[in-house]
Amino acid sequence: MTSTLSFLARRWRASIAYAERLVADVDETTWAAQPWSEVDANGPLWVLGHLSMYGPVIAAVLLDQPIPDTRQGPFARGTQPGDAMASKEEVLVRFLDGAEQAAAALESADEARLSLPNPVERLRGALPETGDLIFHLTTVHQAHHLGQLSGWRKAMGLPAVSMF
C-alpha cells in the first residue's frame, strides 16, 4: 500500500517539474520584469526565490531538524519583487536543491509525524498539526505561487505551459 507521504512526494516532484517548465524559456533579461506598471507582479525571480525557502522547511519539519526562519530575507513574505536581485541560475539552483531536500524527506519520513503538533508555533492556529503544515506547503502554497508565475507568463506574452 502506498503511503500518504509517497503520494505527496510524487505530486511535489511533479510541481517542481512544472515550475522548471514555467521558467525554461524565460531569459535572464526578463527574469525580474514587471509586466504591469500599476502592480508589482510576482514573476520568476521572486516566485522561485520565495519558494526556494520552503523545501528546506519541509525537510526540517519532517526530519525533526531545526527549522529555517522564512520571515527574513529578500524573498520573505511581504517583500516586493524588486527587493532582491539574483541570477536565474542562482535562484534555480537554490530552488531545486531545496525541492530535492523536501522530496527526499517526504519519501523517507515517518508518517506518524504528520499527527504531531505543528512545530511552527506562529502557524498553529491555522495549521494545527504537522500534516496540515506539510500539506499546505506542498500543495496550496506551491500551487498559489506557480499560478502567479503562470499569470506573469501570460502578461509577458509567453505561451502557456502544460502542468503535465
Image (cartoon, rainbow, N blue to C red):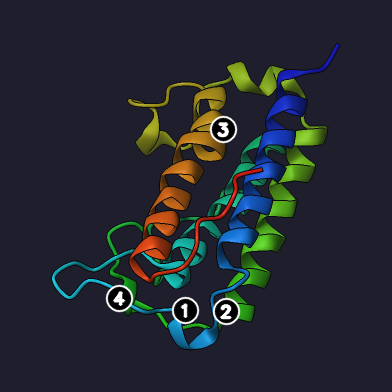
Task: Please state which amino acid type lies under the numbered disc 4.
Answer: Gln
Q: Nearer the viewer, mark 3 or mark 4?
A: 4
Could you tell me which quadrant the C terminus lies in?
top right
Q: Nearer the viewer, residue 107 or 31?
A: 31
Q: Mark 4 highlights which residue?
A: 34
For the residues labelled 4 and 2, the Cα–Cα distance comes to 16 Å
Q: Amino acid at mark 2?
A: Lys
Q: CA distance from mark 3 to mark 2?
A: 27 Å
Closer to us: mark 3 or mark 2?
Answer: 2
The numbered mark at residue 6 is: none
Residue carrying label 2: 88
The nearer-to-camera label among 3 and 1 is 1
Q: Is residue 36 left or right of residue 119?
A: left
Q: Which residue is mark 3?
A: 134
Residue flagged by tag 3: what amino acid is it? Ile
Q: Tell me which residue sits at (36%, 79%) in the image.
A: 33
Q: Which residue in the protein does label 1 denote? A: 31
Residue 111: name its quadrant: top right
